[in-house]
Amino acid sequence: MSLDQAIVADQSSAPPDKSLVSASSAPGPESSSASAGPELVTLVPVSARRRAVPRWLRRTVGPVGLLVLWQVLSGTGVLHPDILASPGTIARTAGSLVSDGTLPSAMLVSVQRVLVGLVLGGIAGVALALASGLSRLGEDLVDATVQMLRSIPWVGVIPLFIIWLGIGEAPKIALIALGVAFHLYLNVYAGIRGVDAHLVEAGSSLGLGRWGLVRHVVLPGALPGAMTGLRYSLATAWLALVFGESVNADDGIGFLMNQAREFFRTDVIVVCLIVYALLGLFADFLVRTLERFLLQWRPTFTGQ
């Protein structure tokens, strides 16, 4: 027996694989012919089999499974209500907080603080990154100082902010702006310095001046890094808000959490944490949408 005949015989005797689909499933005259040779098969891509289950359904498996486990542990008494309230109790608490207007009012105050801090910190971070990334002189004057300051835990400066700015809104917004500025600076600066030097040389050969190169080559090349920095900055802004609203706050989500802590209301605390998570998820969705709009020219790998 020749080598080719042995390979054909081995393939025909192997058990059928579920990932293989016959090229022609209906019987015909060709299938009954002895001279037709081995049956032709085609591979079904793994991605095609995954499309059978909608992506949104796959993404909800983890959260729904965690919620079911949580409810089961609470219903069987394994998880005591004093440790963590059940999902049903938390849902009822959230409904009462929404109906009496407490939660919407607190959300409005917290979102305003985040927006103001994000704008102030974003302006400072991007301005310092442009000065440091576009100029060697700016890098010498700015980068070392920023790198030194960012190594200081920004939460640790709360006592100084209270001494300098009092206990009103100013220290809360300053804390958010500080966390946002560092993330944006690092990512925008890295994006500028990560632009391919060959693109800059090509732009120079086409007659672009310094500002033409910055506008048409450097800034578009740094935009992906800026979007990444914006996503990190939003996450840091919500984290800084939690610490900021612990400084003599009389309204906001952090104020509700501090009140709930005094009375051991785990249901209210969890509601506030869920609100933080949903606001952060919504902010990340907005940035992703903006990223898809601004980076249409830059196709990237999206997974298989």
Image (cartoon, rainbow, N blue to C red):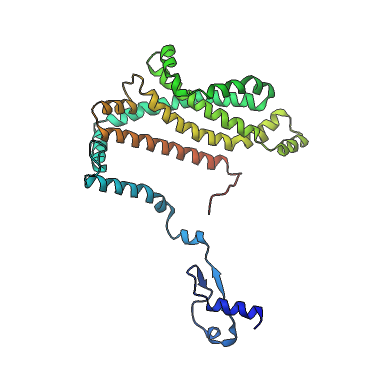
Q: Residue at x 42, y 36 (%)?
A: 280
- In the picture, residue 247 is in which quadrant? top left
Q: Residue at x 47, y 23 (%)?
A: 154
- Horizontal side of residue 52 vs 147, given as left or right: left
In the rendering, at what x and y percent does residue 201 appear?
75, 36
- Horizontal side of residue 174 vs 205, given as left or right: left
* Relative depth, front residue between 172 and 107: 172
Q: Above or below — where is 228 with respect to 105?
A: below
- Horizontal side of residue 155 vs 70, given as left or right: right
> Could you tell me which quadrant the N terminus lies in?
bottom right
In the rendering, at what x and y percent does residue 15 appear?
49, 75
* Relative depth, front residue between 211 and 189: 189
In the rendering, at what x and y percent does residue 25 appear?
49, 77
Q: Above or below — where is 50 with respect to 37?
A: above
Q: Residue furthest front?
A: 1
Q: How many marks?
A: 0
Q: Above or below — where is 272 with respect to 38?
A: above
In the rendering, at what x and y percent does residue 2 appear?
66, 81
